[in-house]
Image: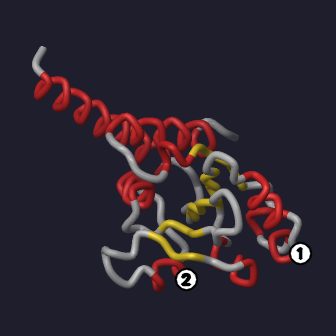
Amino acid sequence: MSRTQQAEDALAQYQQRVKQLRKAIKEKPEKIEISVSRFYKGEFLPQFDTIFSFSGGILQEVGFSAPPHQVELAITPDTAYVLISLERLDLLDADVLFVMLDPGSQDNFNQYQKSPLWQKLSIVQCNRVYTVDSGYWYAGNILAANAILDDLEKYLVNTP
């Protein structure tokens, strides 16, 4: 099989999975708004990914939406992410939050989790925060896109 054929097959498989996930999501009674955040190692500010990011595009394709307050900040297709300070954690609030953790970023993430502002987020209070690997959620290829679909199935579709 040629590389072109392998690529076409991988894309067709991905599109079929998106279609199946979209159908499963439509069967859920509520519409789900999803935030995606990334934490870095060290003193760097975390970010949330917009609808123009790699993961944001996949979420849109599957049928999820971003919170309106995030969409307003994603002014152009060049705005793939927005940095957020501790004082603006409210920007992460949604129905579900996927937190991408870079290698070595756990201490930075822990600092935010200890904040009273973090504890006030509805997603935290409802226990709808899921940590995922930034290695495939942030930027990637068809394999990374399929890994994101795996996470969506695991956390959002195959749960009661």
In this view, the residue farthest toward the top is 1
Amino acid type at circle 2 is His
Can you say whether 128 is above or below 125 in the image?
above
Measuring from the top left, give residue 146's x and y in whole percent: 41, 36
- Up-down relation of residue 20 to residue 4 (above or below): below
Tag 2–tag 1 contact (CB < 8 Å): no
Query: Which mark is on residue 69?
Result: 2
Seen at 68% across and 79% down, the residue is: 85
- Number of numbered discs visible in the structure rendering: 2
Nearest to the eye among marks 2 and 1: give it: 1
Using the rendered view, name the quadrant where residue 7 is placed.
Answer: top left
Q: Secondary structure at mark 2?
A: helix
User: Marks 2 and 1, Cα distance to the nearest angstrom?
Assistant: 21 Å
In the image shown, does 102 or 9 lie closer to the viewer?
102
Q: Residues within 10 Å of mark 2 (few under 14, many from 20)?
A: few
Label 1, secondary structure: give it.
Answer: helix
Q: Is residue 28 left or right of residue 54?
A: right
Query: Which quadrant is the C terminus positioned in?
Result: top right
For mark 1, does the 10 Å Cα neighbourhood hold few (<14), some (14 to 19), or many (20 or more) residues?
Answer: few
Say which quadrant the N terminus sits in.
top left
Going by the image, does 45 lie left or right of 58?
A: right
Identified by mark 1, the residue type is Pro
Which residue bears the numbered disc 1?
A: 116
Left or right: residue 33 versus residue 51 is right
Mark sitting on residue 21: none
**x%, y% of residue 118?**
81, 70
